[in-house]
Image (cartoon, rainbow, N blue to C red):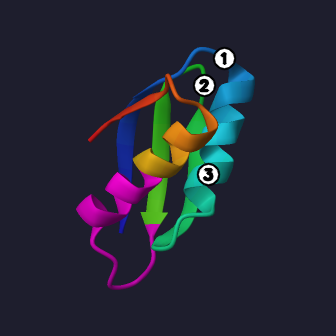
Amino acid sequence: MKKSYKIDVDCANCARKMEDAANATPGVQEASVNFMLLKMNVTFTEGADPKTVMKDVLANCKKVESDCEIYL
């Protein structure tokens, strides 16, 4: 399953950090962040619950960039 989320991030480097943190989260098959569009596209692994996984993604992103936001 693939979903798109609106994000709020200040710079391209921070967006890259968010992308790396999202990709390191269990349940995420692939994540990509588009800084210009302020969007994160996430492909979930088979059987993963997107709501639960995205809470973990947000927590991991906050660890590397505390002022970022993902609108779930």
- Per the rendering, the mark at residue 35 is 2
Callout 3: helix, strand or loop?
helix
Q: Which amino acid does label 3 sit on?
A: Ala
* 59 lies left or right of 20: left
Tell me if 60 is positioned left or right of 21 in this view: left
Which image quadrant is residue 53 in?
A: bottom left
Locate residue 41, reporting x and y percent. 47, 48
The residues tagged by marks 1 and 3 sit, at their Cα atoms, a distance apart of 15 Å
Residue linked to disc 1: 11
Q: Badge 1: few (under 14), some or many (20 or more) residues near its Cα, within 10 Å?
A: few
Magenta residues, start to end: 44-57
Of badges 1 and 2, nearer the viewer stands: 1
Number of numbered callouts drawn: 3
Mark 3 vs mark 2: give the one in front.
3
Q: Residue 44, image x and y in percent? A: 43, 69
| Image quarter of residue 71 | top left
Q: Does the magenta stretch include residue 36?
A: no
Residue at figure coordinates x 28%, y 64% from the top left: 52
36 or 59, nearer to the observer: 59
Location of the C terminus by quadrant is top left
Q: For this view, does 49 lie left or right of residue 34? A: left
Residue at the spot of label 3 = 21
Q: Is residue 65 left or right of residue 43?
A: right
* Label 3 vs 2, first from the N-terminus: 3
Q: Is mark 2 on a helix, strand or loop?
A: loop
Mark 1 vs mark 2: which is more N-terminal?
1
Give how far across and how far down residue 38 sits, in percent.
49, 24
Q: In the rendered view, would you say 54 is above or below 27? A: above
Q: Inspect the image, locate mark 2, and give the three-letter code of the amino acid beneath it.
A: Phe
- Crowdedness of circle 2 by 10 Å Cα count: few (<14), some, many (20+)? some
Q: Which of 40 and 25 is in front in this view?
A: 25
